[in-house]
C-alpha cells in the first residue's frame, strides 16, 4: 500500500497529514504558532520556525501511522500565500518572512502602480496591488533595510522554504508565483516587464513547477531531520487556496468554495482568467495550465474570532459554539465589521480597523461572538456579490477551513449566502489536497482529477439555508454595508491614528 503526505503551512499552525492511496487518513499532526507583529500593521514569521514545526509534525505523523518511511511515496505542500522569504547566497534566511497580512508596504504599492500604469496592472497582474504581497514586501526591504536587501539572492513563497529544506533546491509553483504581483498571469511566467519597471532583478526568482510535478526527492539532511526516506518524491504543491480546492474536490470550472481560515475567501474555478476592471478580487493560476480561479478575499475571518476569544480567559470552541447557537440571527442588533487588519475584497484598503455597532445593555459575550461570526459571513457574502457581478455564480459551495468545524458558523454562512453548503469529510482539506498532488507527482494517480475521485469524500449532510433567517439577514447585510460607507473616512483616520501611537 502506498502512503502519501501533505504538509499545510497555515498562518496560525502547520499540519501534516498521511493518507493511504484509497484516501483513508492514517495520521494528522499539528503545531500551532504565532506570527510576530513588532509594530502596528506588521506581520512577520521566522521561516526556521516553520521548518521546525514541519520536522516535528512529520516525525509525529510517521510514528502515528506506523508504516515504514519508505512506503511514503510522495510528499507535497500547501502554503499561506503572498509572503516573502528572502535567502542570501549561502541559502540562509536574511530576515523574518513578511506575511500576506502585513500592511507596511503602502508606499511600494503606489510605486508599482505608477511604474506600470493601471492599464498594464489590469492586463498583466490582473490583481489589486496590495500590501503583504511578495513584490511590494521585497521592495519595502530594498527601501528600508538596504543592508538586508544587498544580501538577497533568492526570493520565494512561504511553503517554498519548506520545499527547499526538504530537497536542498529552490523552486516555486505557478499558483503561488501568480500571487506575488511579479508574475504574468496569462503566460504563466515571471514578468520581465513588471520586474524591470520596479528595478527588481529577475534572477531572484526561482524556477516554477506545476502543482503536481516532482520538484526533487528528500535530501539527506531532511531525511535525518524528518525521518522521511530519501526515496520519497517531493512534489511542488501550491498556494493554500489551490490545494484546499483540490482537497475539497473542486476541480470543475464553475465550482466554488467558501473558506474560513485565519483569513477567508470565496473561490470560483474557471477555465479563463477572469478580469475585474475594479481590481477588487484576485485571479490566480490554478492547479494546472488552462485553469485559473477568481476569489474574493477577506483579511480577518477565523482571526476575528481568535482575536475576540483572546480577550477572555477561557475560549473553548465547544462552549462558544453552544452559546452562539442559542442567539437568534442578528445577534440582538449587534453588527461587527471584521476589518481588524485592513480589508481586501471589496475595499482594497489596508488602513481600516474593526468595529462593533449596536451594543446595548443586553449585549453579552454570546451576542458579540455571534456578531463576529455574522460579520465574517457578511464580508464573505460581499465577496460572493462582487464575484456574481463578474458572472461567477454557484448553486452550492463547499465550506472549508477551521470555521467549517463550527455548526452555527456553517448555518450562519448558508443562511446569509442563501446557498446550500457541502462539507468535506476531512478537516484538513489543504493537507489532503497536497497529499493528492503528492500522489500524482509520485505516479500513484494519473492526474489530480483521478486523485480527487479516489480520495475526496463529503460529510453525509448538506447545510441548507433557512428562508426566514436569510430574509432577516438581508436587512442586516444592508446595514453592514451602510455602516462601512457612512463610517469609512472616520475609520481610516482612527486606524492611522492608532498606528502612530
Ligand atoms: N471548532 C471551531 N469552532 C469555531 N471556529 C473554529 C473552530 N475550529 C477552528 N475555528 C476557527 O478557524 C480558525 C483556524 O482555521 P484554520 O483553517 O485552521 O487556519 P490556518 O490554516 O490559517 O492556520 C481559528 O482561528 C478559528 O477562528
Ligand atoms: O491571502 C490568502 C489568499 O489570497 C490566504 O490564502 C493566505 O494564503 C493565508 O491563508 P490562511 O492561513 O489565513 O487560511
Image (cartoon, helix red, strand yellow):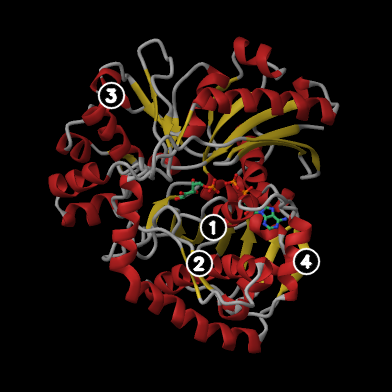
Q: Residue 359 carries which label?
A: none
1 or 2: tag closer to the N-terminus: 1
Q: In which quarter of the image is residue 395?
A: bottom right
2 or 4: tag closer to the N-terminus: 4
Judge the density around disc 2: few (<14), some (14-19), many (≥20) Cα neighbours within 10 Å.
many
Q: How many labels does the image show?
A: 4
Q: Residue 203 carries which label?
A: 3
- In this figure, which residue is indicated by the disc labeled 4? 322
In space, the residues marked 3 and 2 are separated at their CA atoms by: 38 Å
- 326 or 501: nearer the eye? 501
Relative height, residue 190 to residue 396 (above, below): above
Q: Residue 301 carries which label?
A: 1
Circle 1 — which element? Answer: loop
Mark nearest the camera among 2 and 4 is 4
- Give the residue at x 74% y 51%: 426
Judge the density around disc 4: few (<14), some (14-19), many (≥20) Cα neighbours within 10 Å.
some
In space, the residues marked 2 and 4 are separated at their CA atoms by: 23 Å
Circle 4 — which element? Answer: helix
Left/right placement of residue 467 relative to residue 38 reads right
Judge the density around disc 3: few (<14), some (14-19), many (≥20) Cα neighbours within 10 Å.
few
- In this figure, which residue is indicated by the disc labeled 2? 380
Left/right placement of residue 128 relative to residue 244 reads left
Quadrant assignment for the C terminus? top left
- 67 or 416: nearer the eye? 416
Amino acid at each position: 500500500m502506498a502512503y502519501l503526505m501533505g504538509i499545510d503551512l497555515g498562518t496560525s499552525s502547520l499540519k501534516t497529514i498521511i493518507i493511504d492511496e484509497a484516501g483513508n487518513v492514517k495520521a494528522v499532526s499539528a503545531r500551532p504558532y504565532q506570527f510576530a507583529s513588532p509594530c502596528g500593521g506588521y506581520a512577520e514569521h521566522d521561516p526556521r520556525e516553520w521548518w521546525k514545526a514541519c520536522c516535528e509534525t512529520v516525525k509525529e505523523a510517521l510514528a502515528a501511522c506506523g508504516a515504514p518511511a519508505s512506503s511514503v511515496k510522495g510528499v507535497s505542500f500547501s502554503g499561506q500565500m503572498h509572503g516573502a522569504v528572502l535567502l542570501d547566497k549561502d541559502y540562509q534566511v536574511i530576515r523574518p518572512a513578511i506575511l500576506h497580512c502585513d500592511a507596511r508596504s503602502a508606499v511600494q504599492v503606489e510605486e508599482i502602480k505608477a511604474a506600470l500604469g493601471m492599464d498594464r496592472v489590469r492586463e498583466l497582474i490582473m490583481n489589486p496591488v496590495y500590501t503583504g504581497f511578495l513584490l511590494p514586501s521585497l521592495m519595502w526591504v530594498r527601501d528600508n533595510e538596504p543592508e538586508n536587501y544587498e544580501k538577497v539572492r533568492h526570493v520565494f513563497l512561504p511553503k517554498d522554504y519548506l520545499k527547499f529544506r526538504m530537497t536542498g533546491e529552490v523552486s516555486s509553483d505557478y499558483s503561488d508565483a501568480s500571487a506575488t504581483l511579479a508574475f504574468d498571469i496569462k503566460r504563466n511566467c515571471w514578468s520581465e516587464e513588471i520586474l524591470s519597471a520596479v528595478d527588481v532583478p529577475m534572477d531572484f526568482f526561482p524556477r516554477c513547477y506545476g502543482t503536481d510535478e516532482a520538484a526533487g526527492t528528500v535530501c539527506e539532511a531532511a531525511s535525518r531531520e524528518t525521518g522521511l526516506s530519501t526515496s520519497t518524491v517531493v512534489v511542488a504543491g501550491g498556494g493554500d487556496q489551490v490545494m484546499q480546492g483540490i482537497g475539497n474536490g473542486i476541480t470543475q470550472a464553475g465550482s466554488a468554495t467558501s473558506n474560513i481560515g485565519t483569513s477567508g475567501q470565496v473561490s470560483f474555478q474557471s477555465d479563463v482568467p477572469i478580469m475585474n476592471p475594479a481590481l477588487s478580487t484576485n485571479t490566480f493560476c490554478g492547479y494546472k495550465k488552462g485553469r485559473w480561479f477568481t476569489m474574493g478575499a477577506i483579511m480577518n475571518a477565523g482571526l476575528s474570532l481568535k482575536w475576540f476569544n483572546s480577550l477572555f480567559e477561557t475560549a473553548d470552541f465547544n462552549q462558544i459554539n453552544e452559546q452562539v447557537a442559542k442567539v437568534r440571527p442578528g445577534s440582538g442588533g449587534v453588527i461587527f465589521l471584521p476589518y481588524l487588519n485592513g480589508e481586501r475584497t471589496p475595499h482594497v484598503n489596508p488602513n481600516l480597523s474593526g468595529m462593533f455597532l449596536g451594543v446595548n445593555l443586553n449585549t453579552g459575550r454570546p451576542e458579540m461572538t455571534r456578531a463576529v461570526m455574522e460579520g465574517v459571513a457578511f464580508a464573505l457574502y460581499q465577496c460572493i456579490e462582487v464575484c456574481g457581478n463578474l458572472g461567477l455564480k454557484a448553486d452550492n459551495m463547499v465550506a472549508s477551513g477551521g470555521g467549517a468545524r463550527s455548526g452555527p458558523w456553517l448555518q450562519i454562512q448558508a443562511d446569509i449566502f442563501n446557498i446550500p453548503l457541502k462539507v468535506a469529510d476531512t478537516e484538513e482539506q489543504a493537507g489532503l489536497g497536497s497529499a493528492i498532488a503528492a500522489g500524482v507527482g509520485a505516479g500513484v494517480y494519473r492526474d489530480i482529477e483521478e486523485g480527487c475521485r479516489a480520495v475526496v469524500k463529503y460529510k453525509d449532510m448538506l447545510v441548507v439555508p433557512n428562508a426566514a433567517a436569510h430574509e432577516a439577514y438581508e436587512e442586516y447585510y444592508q446595514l453592514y454595508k451602510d455602516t462601512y460607507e457612512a463610517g469609512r473616512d472616520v475609520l481610516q483616520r482612527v486606524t492611522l491614528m492608532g498606528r502612530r501611537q
